[in-house]
Structure formats: C-alpha cells, structure tokens
Amino acid sequence: MIPELGEYSLILALCLAALLAVVPLAGATTGNRLWMSYARPLARAKFLFLAVSMACLVQSFLTDDFSVAYVAGNSNTALPYYYKFSAVWGGHEGSLLLWVLILGGWTWAVAAKSEDLPLDIVARVLSVMGMIAVGFILFTLLTSSPFERLLPNSPAEGGDLNPLLQDFGLIVHPPMLYMGYVGFSVAFAFAIAALLSGRLDAAWARWSRPWTVVAWAFLTLGIALGSWWAYYELGWGGWWFWDPVENASFMPWLIGTALVHSLIVTEKRGVFKSWTVLLAIFAFSLSLLGTFLVRSGVLTSVHAFATDPARGYFVLALLGISIGGSLLLYALRAGHVKSESSFSLLSRETMLLINNIVLVVVCLMVLLGTLYPLLMDALNLGKISVGPPYFNSLFIPLMSVMIIFLGLGTVARWKQTRVSQLVAKLWLPAVLSVLTGLAVPVLAGEAYDIRVALAIMLAAWVFFSQLRDLLSKVRNKSNPIEGLRSLARSYWAMQLAHIGVAVTIVGITMVSVYSDARDLRMAPGDSIQFGPYTFVYDGVREHKGPNFVSDKARIRVLRNDAMYTEMYPEKRFYNARGNVMTEAAIDPGFTRDLYVAMGESLGDGAWAIRVQYKPYVRWIWLGGLLMTVGGLLAASDPRYRKQARREARRAQAQGGMKAQAQTQESTA
Amino acid sequence: MTPKRKQRLVIVLAILVGVSVAVGLTLFALSQNINLFYSPTQIAQGEAPTDTRIRAGGMVVEGSVERSTDSLQVRFELTDYGETVPVEYTGILPDLFREGQGIVAQGSLDGNGVFQAVEVLAKHDENYMPPEVAEALQASGKMPTPEAEVFNK
C-alpha cells in the first residue's frame, strides 16, 4: 500500500511538473498574469508530492518491506536503522528519486524566496525548472521506479546494502553533491528565462548570483566529503583518483567556479553578459553529463550501480534536448547583447577573464581525459584508460597560473589598474611568499624538494595577497576595528574562500610529497618504525558486528618509545552478500594522520599490513570546508535582497507602466 | 585600428594562443598516458608490447595464486580460458581479489613474458566482472554462464 502511494504521488508530481512547465511560461509569453501566478503554487505542490513519495520509500526501507524490489536489493533486516535510511539513496532508483526531490526543493525555494522579482521572470524560471523535473520524473517512472514490487514471490531477507556504502560518508555525501548538481539548475533556469525574455541585463546576474553561489558551496562540500569518504573507506588512503565518476562531479565544479566569478563581473560592470549565460548553461549541462556518465552504466565503479541500455539512452536524450535546446536559444538570442561598459587590458575584469579561461580549459582537459576512453571504445579503437599522470601534468601548471592571477585580481581595480599600483601593493606579499616557499622544504627536514617550494609559494601568495588587500581596506579607516566591521559580508566570504584555496594547496602538496607508506608482512610482535612512531602488531582477534564478522587487529603505537595510542584496523566479512571489506584505522591529527589497513591473512597469525603516515591530509578538506562557508556567507549577504527589491521596482517601472511612472515622478 | 579594436585583437590573440598551447599540451600528455588493454590471448600471441605500461585482464586461474613466505610478493595466472599469462605483483591485493574472479592488472610485460603488475584492480562485486574482461571472454567464446540472482544467496 505504502509503495503504491509513493508511486502515485510521483505520478501526481509529474502532472504538476508538466503544468508548471507549460502554464506559467505561456502566461509570460502572452502577458496573462493569472497564468503566471500559477507558478508558485504549482512549485509548492510539486515539492509536497515529491516529499510524500520520498517519505513512502523511506517508510518501506525502515519497515523492511522486501516485497519492494529496490528495498530487497539494497537493504537487510540486520542493517542498523541509520543505514536503512541512507540505503534509500544507496542504489540507482533511490538516488534518482533523491535527485528529483532535491530539484523540487530548489524549485520550491525559488518560489518562496522570489517575492521581490518581477512576476514574468519568476514564471519563466519556475517553468524551466518544471521542464527539467518532467524529464527526470519521467525517467524515474519509466526506467527506474524504486516502487516496483516483487510479488508474489517476495524474498524474506534483503540482499543488503553494498558494504562500501555502509558508512557515515554515504549518508551525507550524495545529498550534498546532488544539492550542488541540481542547484545549478537554478542558475540555468535564470539564464534561460533571461534569454526567453530578451532582457539580458545585469539584473538577472544579480538575481541568480546567490542561488549559484549556494549551489557551488554545496557542490564543493559534496566533493570534499566524497574525497574524505574515499580516503577512509576505500581502505588505501588515496583521496583523489581522477576516476571518471569523480571527474563527473569535478567538471561542473570547475565551470561553476568560473560562473560564480563571471557573475560578479556581469553584475558589477555589465560586461561578459553572454559569456556568463553560456557558463550557466554549461554548468548545468555538465551536471547532466555527470548524471549520464554515472547513471547510464557506461562507467564502472562503485558509483555505477546498474547497466541498463534503456536508461543510458533516456539520459542521453534528456542531455541532448536540454543542451541542444538551450544552445539553440542562446544562438538566437545572445547575439545582439551589448556591453554596458568598457575596461582596459590591465583591470580586475581581465584578471577574472583569465580565471574563467583557465577554469574552462582545465574543464575541457578533464572532459577530454574522461570521454577519450569512451570514445575510443565506441569507435572500436581499443580499450584504453587515461591515467592520473595525464591529469596531474595539465592540472597543476594550469591551476598555478590561475593562482597567480587570483592574487592580482583581488588587489586590482575595476576598469583600469596601473602597473605601479599593483607593484606598490603586491611587492611585499610576493617577497614574503617566495621566502615562505623556500623555507618550508627546509623546515620539513627531508631532502629539499623544489615542487614543495613552488607550491607553498603559491599558497603563501594567496594568503599574503588576501591579507594585503584586507589591510588596505582597513587602513583608511580611523579605527581598525571599525574598519573590519564595516566590510561587507561578501568581502569576508571572498577572503574565506580564497584562504580555503591556499589551505587545500598546502594539504595536497604536503600529503603528495611527504606521505610515507609501507606494505609489509607482520607476524604478532613485529614492529615498524616511522619517524618518531613505532607500530607494534599484537595479533588479530575475531569480532562480531550487527551484520558482519571481522578480524580485528590490535596495533600499539609508540611515540619516542612512550605509549601513544592503540589502533584497530579490521577486515570485515558481510554475511548477506559475502563481501569482504577493509576498515582502516586512522589516528587523525591537524598536521598528520596515521593510517593502518589490513591486507590479507598470510597464515600463522601473520597479515599483510599497510602502514601510512599522511602529513597535512586534513587540510585538503579543511580548505574545501572554508570554501563552502565562504560560499554560504556570500549568499547570505543582505545586499542581495535590498538590490533585488530595487531592481524589481525598476523593472516594473520599465514594464510600460508609463502613467504610473509619471505619477511617481510628480509625487516626488 | 582604433585603440579599442587593438585591445580586442590582443585579447582574442591571447585566448587563441592560450587555447592552442593548452590543446597541444593536452594531446601530448594524453599520448604519454594512455594505457591500452590486452587480453591473455593477445599477450600470448605477442600482440602486446613489452616494457610499456599496459593493462591486462582476465580470470584468476583457480589454484594458481602463490604467496611468498617472507614478503608480499605474489604470483598468479590470468586466463581468458584460451591462453594464460603469469603475473607477478608485490603488495596488498584488493578485497575482491579471489581465484576464479575477473581482475584487471596495470603494469608491463617483461622479456620473459611475465606481466609485472604495479596495480591490481578488482572493481566489481562477486557476480560481476570488469567490462574489459567480459568483452575479452566473449571474444574468446568462453563467457561463463552468469551466477544466480543477487538476492537470497
């Protein structure tokens, strides 16, 4: 009964989405205000029914209703309740439902938060989001409904959730990632609405900026969480693999980062307008491409659950319609957009343009490396894979260029900057970062590594240039505390996010160069020395979990021969599927992680054990967290609301209500 | 040319140069870093180059895994049920590595026809094999019949 209710709600949501896609848009085209006003209630009702549908699926999971095929395939009575809950999006069907639910959530949020926008824009934006919803709800219902029953032969026990996914990381990683992916649909919808209305001015940039930056912040958090999850759960301490599925989420992030910056220029200076629209289209298209890559089964990885060609074709068709349609619209409408101002070659506009170009080029290179093997395979030119060296050898130099311009762009002025100004402001940060860069490898105490020196120089450059800019903002004020207070929230957001970039660079550099890993055979009593730490292996004991049994090793860690801590890595055997899983033991720290994982039993109590020393690895995710906070802070700047209100008034005044404008003038 | 046009020309040229450098670098890096996949039959017939980074995949032959007693060196054989190739690897094997299962190894072929693996991948669950392996088995006509349903095992 409950699953049928879920399916029924989903069908209702589809009908509402179809209405939402058509009625308000038709109203906006014909100027029918009544039809336009249907947009908000429809968006709210659609979200309500999607939520009901999701609640039904959650209920089926929590009550172990194995007559539902999807529950039977992804859950088990022995699973703890919180994993039953997260198992809802542990497979293909459920994660699609989560996708449409989150899309519904964003649509609802736009409907609720848009009271200051002109009605025709709201109607168009919500209609575009309704169209996307129609596509994806149809996809869910036709090819991958999570509510399908296994009747009458329903199993008594479920097949269990993939043990890799039985983890806190999986409870939070997919929702955050989807919030980001799907959030770009708002920027996309605003861009399409602007194209449809033909009013491609700075206003649309202002309206879509907070939405875009929130989506970007969630995507950043989602990627950081994914990397953290891979680090501790996949068992071997890697934090980024350039795996196609990771790339699928990284590409929208790159374009999203470009978009967030380009929107600033469009809003403040009224230039790059058509470029920004194009970026908004690309950011969402790449989110769709990511969905296609992961969901169609063309990739194999822990993320790709099923291989069903029908699903692949369906997503491909969705992809084709949305990208093709929006680019066609772009080609028809964006051609005669005029810039509202000009800028000289040396200005903040140029610096941000360089930021955009580098990010787009990096994205193209990731795209090429990801799609090349698929292309070769499709053309029968052989099975190939593109290794991490390809990505690293391009990503690092390109991003280094961008980091240099990050510092320049922060300090540079809009419209025009003189070289002398830049030199006067930045010579000290430059000298300081070179000195820091040269000093850090010496302090690290190992063989001098020039790569570390260069990378730390870049991180220090970000840090010192931000600091310099902050100082010059405060210096003019009589009281420094007053000065700090007077800075806008969005300025602090920029500072935080940029410092986050520096922190991530430090983490990546240190862990890539100074990590130490050893695989060895350890019998009880064996020990191994790692700098000041000694790891003593005491042997393995059997241990029983809720739905698994495990071999749990005890490893004592001594620091300078004094007892420091004990670590318990595990080798788990999950009964339901017969899967074996490595559960690493980690001693986390601000400046280093100790990481121990068990390989396989070698007989006589001896095990293959991997011991790792990971300096500064946490900084990678700490930087991601700072960027996320920066993004959310920027979106919460009260300035947007005030400006949106002003903008809306102006748009209404321009909307042909001459008489009203005249009365306003006369009263003024 | 007006100064404004000149400025535009400079920007366009800069973008062009930037993009072409990036494309050149990308193609170069790509050509250095693609790893071709070979099946055991292809390797046995001498189609695979030696001392070049390649991928090899197949089923691990039952009873062929030999562990060294004092190190993590392991030796096993990989088959597509047509030919077999010996593989040597030092390190920890993935959790899903088992005899009779499909794997993909990354490494190079030495002069003696032994595949020296630097990485062994087993990215699949117990009734699923890597797509490369599945295709290689289909090509040799030795695809085993799929195992039973996932549920209720």
Image (cartoon, coloured by chain):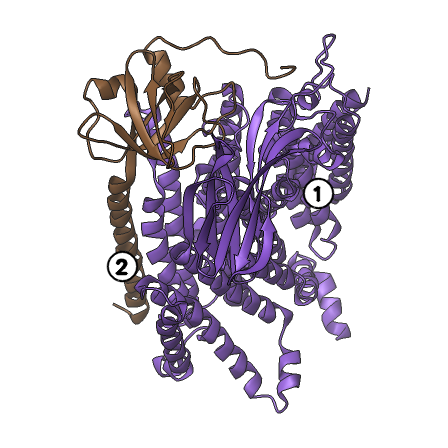
Q: Amino acid at mark 2?
A: Leu
- Is residue A585 shown left or right of residue A346? right
Quadrant for the N terminus of chain A in the image: top right
Quadrant (top left/top right/bottom left/bottom right) for the C terminus of chain A? bottom right
SS at mark 1 in the image? helix
Q: Is residue A316 depicted above or below A224 in this figure?
A: above
Residue ID for mark 1: A105
**Mark 2 belongs to which subunit?**
B
Chain A appears what colour? purple
Q: Position of residue A417 (x, y in %)?
A: 40, 77
Q: Is residue A96 visible?
A: no
Q: How would you rate the neighbour count of disc 1 (Cα within 10 Å): few for under 14, some for 14-19, many for 20 or more?
A: many
Q: Nearer the viewer, residue A27 or A543?
A: A543
Q: Nearer the viewer, residue A375 or A661?
A: A375
Specify the quadrant of the image occupied by residue B36: top left
Which residue: 51% across, 18% down? Answer: B127
Three-letter amino acid code at disc 1? Gly
Q: Is residue A558 left or right of residue B8?
A: right
Residue A255 in the image: state x and y as whole percent. 47, 50
Q: Quadrant of residue A562?
A: bottom right
Q: Which mark is residue A368?
A: none
According to the rendering, which colour does chain B have?
brown
Residue at image mark 2: B13
**Image quarter of residue A299:** top left
Q: Residues within 10 Å of mark 2 (few under 14, many from 20)?
A: few
